[in-house]
Amino acid sequence: MSIDPALRQRLQQLLADYGAKVRALIEGHGLGHYGIDPADIEQEVRIRLWKALERDRNAAFHTSYIQRVVLTTVIDAIRAVNARPVDPLPEAGETVDPAFVEPTAGPERSASGIEDFDRIMACMAELPERRRKAVALHLQGFSLREIGEFSGTSEEAARKLLDRGMETLRERLAIAGFGEFDD
Amino acid sequence: MIKPGLANVYRRFTRHQAPEGLPQVDALLALADGDHGVETERLLTEVGRSGLHADLLRLARALSPESARLGVQLEQAFDATSAGHRRDRRALRNAAPPRGWLRAASALAAGLLIAVAVWSLQRSHMVAPAAKHEVAASDKAVPDRIFAALSERRAPASAGKGDQIFRADFKSDRIFKSSEG
């Protein structure tokens, strides 16, 4: 598709503005912690959207399509980071880093607090499923409105699930000797 | 509701946990839009257990208004360009009306010329065979007596028997000759 120069300039400006917002959102949501470079994501999103415009301009007008391009770019980048070769495994007889013992562990897992986390997880596992989900989403930072929306319930229903779940969790943690979380 | 300590510990340790791998984009978008199904339920469980999933879900929701705005802006940019092109073409047409008239007049004149040419051709085809037939017939026929009579003096006497009126053994009117008798 041939795009006249004035339109090309306007489209590139729009994509540049959008790319900058995407970069800010990635940084603001802490996705840089996963090893991706927000500047790379911004650049890649702009390239992919431009190609989409050249291929089929109507497709690029859809909100879900634009969101899909960004999320796919981010997930691809995270996948690429995870696929990077790690340091070679230690030879026999060498001291083994605790991180290698637990395959799903992050770097902080070997640090202090792991026992607290394990205890929290154990107590949460005893909660009824709906309350456990509400508590988990709350601890991940989602609002009552979001928890209700994700769970298909009203905000009020989500609040009740969360209140009961947190109450039970506190009781279990207190019994287990971790009452300091309630301070 | 709960002291930040608990949430902090929870997030810190779930940040690098992705039990079921990376999320599917379709399910992520569906959950961000508030849709409910088997996939979104499964993903919601993962979001509770994985900080990465939770961050991606938050990003998906935050992207929605900006993406909608970009979609509208892109559409407007294309529409504005198309409208500009339509305006330019209209202006061009309006700015050159004589050329339009000239073109119409030329077309009319060409049409007339073609019509005349066709008519002439047809007419010549109709006239030509008749003329040929007449020429052929005249070779055999006795020349027209009326016109032949005019050149009678030049024609030989044995040329034929001409018109009786003109070739009759004409005798003078007796009435006029009675005076002679």
Image (tube, coloured by chain):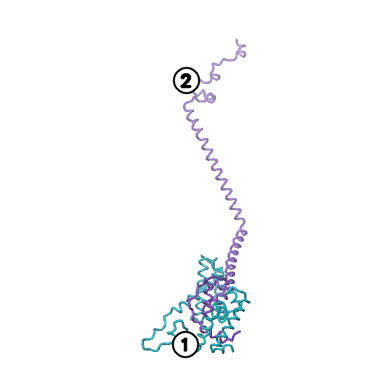
* Drawing shade for chain A: cyan
Residue most toward the front? A175
| Residue at screen point 40% across, 87% down | A96
Depth check, front residue: B44 or A15: B44
- Residue type, numbered disc 1: Ser
Residue tagged 1: A110
Residue B118, given in percent of the width and then of the height, sits at: 54, 42
Label 2, residues with CA under 10 Å away: few <14, some 14-19, many ≥20: few
Q: Quadrant of residue B164?
A: top right
* Mark 1: secondary structure: helix
Give the purple chain's letter. Answer: B
The reply to whether callout 1 and callout 2 are in contact (CB within 8 Å) is: no
| Residue at screen point 62% across, 56% down | B97
Residue B166's place in the image compared with B88, above or below, is above
Q: What is the chain letter for disc 1?
A: A
Residue tagged 2: B158
Quarter of the picture containing the C terminus of chain B is top right
- Residue type, numbered disc 2: Ser
* Mark 2: secondary structure: helix
Q: What is the chain letter for disc 2?
A: B
